[in-house]
Image (spheres, rainbow, N blue to C red):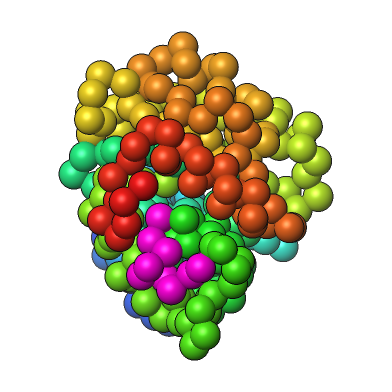
Amino acid sequence: MSSLSLKMQPVSAQRVTVTEDSLAVDLSDGRTVSVPLMWYPRLVQGSPRERNNWRLIGGGEGIHWPDLDEDLSVDGIIMGRASGESQESLKRWLEDRNRAVTRSVFEAARAKHLPDQIEILFIAEAPPAYDSGRFFYFEQVDRGDALFLEMMKVLYPKKAHFDESTGNWKTGYGARWVRTRKAEFLNLFSGDGFYLIDAVDEPMPSNATPRVKEEIIRNSLRQLKAKLDDLGKLGNDRCLPVTLIGAPVFNVCATELTKGSVRILNDEMINTPARGGMREFRRKLYKLLKSHQVKISDSCM
């Protein structure tokens, strides 16, 4: 009976080795089974660090990769079974993975320019589409970037060589010139205690109406308030000074955020600087900064 029991004991994994081409599993019976990595698309998509971050589950009957949300059974590997994941499931996983990676890149770029003390926190609507190649805190952007460009015109007209009286860039200096010096402007921005976050973490749907945007922002208020609680430690007084940008943000947050430890500076909506709203954005933002006597290194308000 004892020998029969030994023969019926399940084979378990002892060690896992993942290379660029193969997955090898050392088994409890002394064998090593190696299979092509291409059988498992999630492992193929993973980085070496993610592939090597595995753990045995079920007493070695399975292998789990937490970074890739992948689980493989040892029996399946021994039997030579490739991943049974559908193409639709894999597509959704890849999309979620790409969003998470891009979001972490956004947050790293933003964190790089976090001021030691926040004089004004700007809250915009949402980050741009993940495949746009644009973001307020990206230092290399070759097109678009309206919020950054219009903000710099108001805050640093001398540095940007912008003349509001004519509504144009000075000769020889334009959007392209400012973009090539974006890192310098972002350093000025953070150095003066300015910081910008988004009301929601994910880009808005491309066809979202103002009402839909407001609903999305309303559903994200808990996360936004948590961010404000953290950033409040960097405020220059007990209430974090906040400026709301865009109608959906103002309509939802102007009332809701006053219930917390923030001070909303604008008593009117400041237009989003897109689709013809650039001039109104500059006019209203300049008016707000002047009324609160905000000190800026480039010019005296």
Residue displayed at 56% across by 63% down: 165
Q: Nearer the viewer, residue 27 or 100?
A: 100
Left or right: 6, with 35 as reference point:
left
Q: Is residue 35 visible?
A: no
Left or right: 138, with 285 as reference point:
left
Kindly indicate the quadrant of the structure image that contains residue 189: bottom left
Q: Nearer the viewer, residue 209 or 236?
A: 236
In this view, which residue lies farthest toward the left?
116
Q: Is residue 247 visible?
A: yes
Residue displayed at 50% across by 41% down: 287
Image x and y of residue 19, in percent:
35, 77
Q: Is residue 161 magenta?
A: yes
Image x and y of residue 24, in percent:
36, 71
Image x and y of residue 209, in percent:
80, 41
Q: Is residue 74 magenta?
A: no
Left or right: 236, with 270 as reference point:
left
Highlighted range, magenta: 155-163
In this view, which residue lies farthest toward the bottom?
172
Image x and y of residue 264, in percent:
46, 25
86 is higher (above) or lower (below) than 211: below
